[in-house]
């Protein structure tokens, strides 16, 4: 039986790497005695498969992982057992029996992020950045340079940016309470971008394009979606976006 | 402070999880004014500190006390350390983010000499005066314990109290002492005087050290009526009755050894003459296998770890090792939890055990031969023959290992050219055996040869010996490099300059405190790390203080010379150490504790004797 979990990453666990997150989840599954299946071979490991990794330092309200179970379990029971064993900042939101056959990595191609100003960013800097952010959508090209091991290449991010808008006050306070952030958050921006194998827009690059430093913002991934035939679907239910 | 750390520091450092606390199972107690507050400090980075069992035992023991709490702190890595200085953030505890200065006790574990500069940096970052004499009633009591406390003299001026020997009972006495001090409103001096009356508690400021013009010590004498002439180490008589935590903190990031640990035995009765642990942790005391099994299962249940290690100085010597391993594997195999044996004896029995538990052949097996010839192994009392090694290695190759690690030391007392040739010869014989055994897969054979430099340690029969001059060691390393440039053999030699410094501090006196302080001023820290170790700065610090490294490292000492640690009593008598040294020079083995008692003094003088669990190991 395959189960897909949706989980949140908050403080302080947002500071650990993807690999450490995997270890933390594995240990919690062991403590909760969830009957996860193991791989064969000399070095058996739990059969888990994550969606696109979250950068160190980012929060998330919308991460996904697939588990293969050796024995069937009611998804809601699994959520309850696991939530009793998770470390600080890690929280399972819901679970469903996995429907489709594709892996999370292959399927997920759109991400929503909220970028919040950190408290010590001065107001005049915020104004400047607000100005720069609001202009980004109007540009026809947004080039960034990326360095790989061997070469530097230029990438146009513009086709991969679907939306940039200022978060409403209601949205900010709603998100803030969902994130239980240890830091007081200021106003913020919402971005919807393409991720995965095609353009893979990184929030850090958008921040850079606006002329800001990554340290000016706290970044929270607020949604991950599967874009199919022009429609956004929720990875958990495959329902179209409005139902998510 | 937590907000500043969260928003201004953590986003800019590597591995921020080292500094954020709140790990699964970490104990979070609410601060009450009358509680005794202890912070345990590991003077190295989190990844190393979290793999250390001793501190975890003390942490859980203190937190068992209702009116005490214990938190942790580690040396911040360079990037974080510099940022903390820049932002004016003091060293803080991981549980509650309190500045270290708010605690009643700051306890350092003293695991290796090259962490001393980090201790000073941590004190500075805590805002606590470096020297004990400059501290007031308000400041935390700075306490040290662990193996280096057996010669604490180079850092004596920076500490208020050293606890010598086993810590799990002594730590309760320390908490009681501080509770009384708080209740009665004692001055710092009064607290230290009361501390001096507790067994195993050494108050360095209560002793005066006088020197001859040569720099040798003329005398060490108490200057306070509460201080004893000699401080005898604490020893836990019965490990089955001793406290051992049934739970463990699950680190956020992968520590150097990522597993839970049970301690099958304390002390080692083999008596290898270079090994300080083999003398200062006597007598050998084994823990009941059924208790160990319960402890291991509890730890696995509570943490979700994938591996449990059976630790001790020589776990292969534990009387019930095979049955214990077997029962644990039966209990844990189903849930894919593995059992690890970190210290392996050089024999085929141990290889058999290792192959049973290590179904994965990823890591190599390490065999500590220490010396290249039978003669030199007799000198150091390492009772392993080349036949033992070849049998063990053959068993390893037959069991499917392709990679073998051989460990040697250079500069052992009486070492000569034939001993170096012996190392080369052993490596070649292992390689030849590998080619024979592995047949068509011989191309996969890897032999890692790891060569350390001998460091004479206090409380061992070699405490009288000079360390080889650095140039001599370098020559010996060059010889090995020239002769071991063989396909499939990888030689790595330990940094000589670090070994020199280790030798200086291992047998150093109180005058070295000024050198340490000067080295810290010059910028020395993380001396155990190649990327930060700066020998030039150390040479400058010694020059500035008018002291000579070779006086400490490269001078042999007469039997009647007063050593800086002579007032610290490990239970092993100096007479026994002298006898052992003489036996070494006669190129002769001495029996281990399990074979015949040589009356080293421990079981005669201390309230403990060797304790072995029933039955004998199946060999």
Image (cartoon, coloured by chain):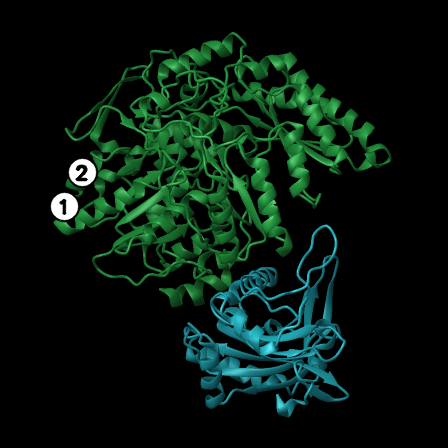
Chain colours: A cyan, B green
Q: Residue furthest right?
A: B440
Q: Secondary structure at mark 1?
A: loop
Q: Chain of mark 1?
A: B
Q: Residue furthest bottom?
A: A242
Within-10-Å neighbours for mark 2: few <14, some 14–19, many 20+: some
Horizontal and vertical percent for residue B148? 39, 33
Q: Residue furthest front?
A: B615
Instruction: Please say if B111 is above or below A167.
Output: above
- A32 left or right of A139 in image: left
Residue at 51% x, 22% y: name it: B272
Decide which of tag 2 and tag 1 comes sooner along the chain: 1
**Residue plotted at (65% across, 30% down):** B349
Marking on residue B186: 1
Chain under label 2? B
Residue labelled with disc 2 = B194
Dot 2 and dot 1 residues touching (CB under 8 Å): yes
Q: Position of residue B567 (x, y in %)?
A: 29, 23
Residue B336 placement (x, y as % from top left) = 64, 54
Q: Is residue B142 left or right of residue B559?
A: left
Nearer to the camera, B598 or B116: B598
Task: Please state which of residues A230 and A37 is positioned toward the viewer in this rendering.
Answer: A37
Residue A74 picture quarter: bottom right
Rendered-image quadrant of the N terminus of chain B: bottom left
* Res B513 quadrant in image: top left
Q: Whole-percent x and y of residue B220?
A: 25, 21
């Amino acid at each position: 039986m395959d189960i897909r979990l949706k989980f949140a990453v908050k403080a302080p666990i947002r500071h650990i790497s993807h690999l450490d997150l995997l270890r933390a989840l594995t240990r919690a599954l062991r403590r909760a005695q969830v009957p996860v299946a193991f791989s064969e071979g000399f070095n058996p490991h739990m059969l888990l498969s994550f969606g696109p990794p979250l950068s160190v330092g980012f929060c998330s309200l919308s991460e996904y992982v697939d588990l293969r179970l050796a024995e069937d379990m009611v998804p809601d029971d699994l959520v309850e057992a696991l939530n009793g064993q998770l470390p600080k900042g890690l929280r399972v939101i819901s679970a469903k029996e996995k429907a489709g056959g594709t892996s999370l990595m292959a399927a997920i191609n759109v991400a929503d992020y909220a970028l919040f100003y950190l408290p010590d960013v001065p107001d005049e800097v915020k104004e400047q950045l607000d100005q720069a952010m609001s202009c980004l959508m109007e540009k026809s090209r947004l080039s960034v340079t990326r360095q790989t091991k061997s070469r530097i290449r230029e990438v146009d991010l513009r086709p991969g940016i679907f939306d940039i808008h200022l978060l409403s006050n209601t949205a900010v306070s709603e998100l803030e309470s969902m994130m239980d952030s240890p830091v007081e958050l200021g106003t913020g921006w919402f971005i919807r971008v393409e991720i995965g194998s095609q353009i893979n827009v990184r929030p850090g690059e958008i921040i850079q394009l606006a002329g800001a430093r990554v340290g000016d913002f706290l970044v929270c991934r607020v949604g991950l979606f599967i874009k199919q035939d022009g429609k956004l679907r929720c990875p958990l239910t495959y329902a179209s976006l409005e139902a998510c | 402070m937590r907000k500043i750390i969260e928003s201004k520091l953590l986003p800019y450092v590597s591995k921020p999880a080292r500094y954020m606390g709140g790990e699964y199972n970490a104990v979070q107690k609410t601060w009450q004014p009358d509680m005794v507050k202890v912070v345990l400090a590991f003077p190295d980075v989190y990844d190393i500190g979290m793999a250390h069992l001793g501190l975890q035992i003390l942490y859980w023991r203190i937190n068992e006390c209702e009116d005490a709490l214990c938190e942790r702190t580690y040396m911040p890595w360079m990037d974080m350390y510099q940022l903390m200085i820049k932002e004016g953030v003091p060293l803080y505890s991981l549980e509650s983010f309190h500045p270290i200065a708010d605690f009643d006790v700051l306890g350092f574990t003293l695991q290796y000499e090259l962490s001393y500069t980090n201790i000073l940096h941590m004190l500075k970052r805590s805002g606590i005066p470096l020297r004990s004499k400059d501290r007031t009633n308000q400041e935390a009591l700075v306490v040290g314990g662990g193996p280096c406390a057996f010669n604490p003299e180079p850092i004596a001026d920076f500490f208020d109290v050293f606890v010598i020997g086993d810590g799990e009972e002594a730590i309760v006495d320390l908490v009681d002492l501080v509770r009384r001090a708080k209740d009665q409103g004692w001055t710092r001096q009064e607290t230290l005087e009361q501390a001096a009356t507790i067994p195993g508690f050494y108050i360095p400021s209560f002793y005066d050290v006088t020197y001859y013009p040569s720099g040798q010590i003329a005398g060490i004498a108490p200057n306070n009526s509460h201080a004893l002439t000699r401080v005898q180490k604490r020893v836990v008589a019965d490990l089955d009755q001793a406290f051992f935590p049934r739970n463990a903190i699950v680190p956020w990031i992968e520590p150097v050894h990522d597993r839970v640990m049970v301690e099958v035995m304390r002390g080692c009765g083999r008596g290898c003459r270079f090994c300080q642990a083999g003398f200062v942790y006597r007598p050998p005391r084994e823990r009941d296998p059924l208790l160990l099994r319960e402890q291991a299962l509890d730890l696995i249940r509570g943490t979700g770890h994938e591996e449990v290690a059976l630790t001790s100085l020589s776990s292969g010597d534990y009387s019930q090792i095979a049955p214990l391993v077997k029962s644990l594997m039966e209990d844990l195999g189903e849930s894919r939890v593995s059992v690890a044996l970190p210290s392996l004896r050089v024999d085929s029995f141990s290889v058999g055990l290792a192959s049973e538990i290590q179904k994965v052949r990823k890591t190599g097996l390490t065999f500590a031969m220490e010396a290249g010839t039978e003669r030199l192994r007799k000198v150091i009392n390492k009772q392993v023959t080349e036949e033992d090694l070849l049998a063990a290695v053959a068993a390893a190759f037959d069991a499917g290992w392709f990679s073998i690690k051989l460990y040697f030391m250079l500069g052992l007392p009486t070492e000569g050219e034939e001993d170096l040739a012996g190392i080369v010869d052993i490596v070649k014989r292992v390689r030849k055996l590998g080619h024979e055994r592995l047949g068509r897969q011989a191309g996969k054979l890897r032999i890692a040869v790891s060569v350390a430099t001998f460091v004479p340690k206090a409380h061992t029969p070699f405490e009288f010996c000079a360390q080889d001059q650095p140039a001599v060691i370098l020559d010996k390393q060059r010889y090995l490099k020239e002769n071991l440039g063989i396909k499939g053999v990888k030689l790595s030699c330990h940094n000589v300059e670090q070994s020199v410094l280790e030798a200086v501090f291992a047998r150093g006196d109180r005058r070295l405190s000024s050198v340490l302080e000067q080295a810290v001023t010059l910028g020395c820290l993380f001396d155990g790390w190649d990327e930060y170790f700066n020998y030039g700065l150390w040479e400058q610090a010694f020059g500035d203080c008018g002291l000579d490294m070779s006086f400490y490292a490269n001078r042999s000492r007469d039997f009647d010379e007063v050593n800086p640690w002579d007032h610290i009593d490990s239970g092993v008598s100096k007479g026994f150490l002298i006898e052992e040294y003489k036996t070494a020079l006669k190129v002769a083995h001495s029996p281990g504790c399990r074979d015949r008692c040589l009356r080293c003094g421990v079981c005669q003088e201390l309230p403990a004797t060797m304790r072995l669990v029933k039955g004998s190991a199946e060999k």
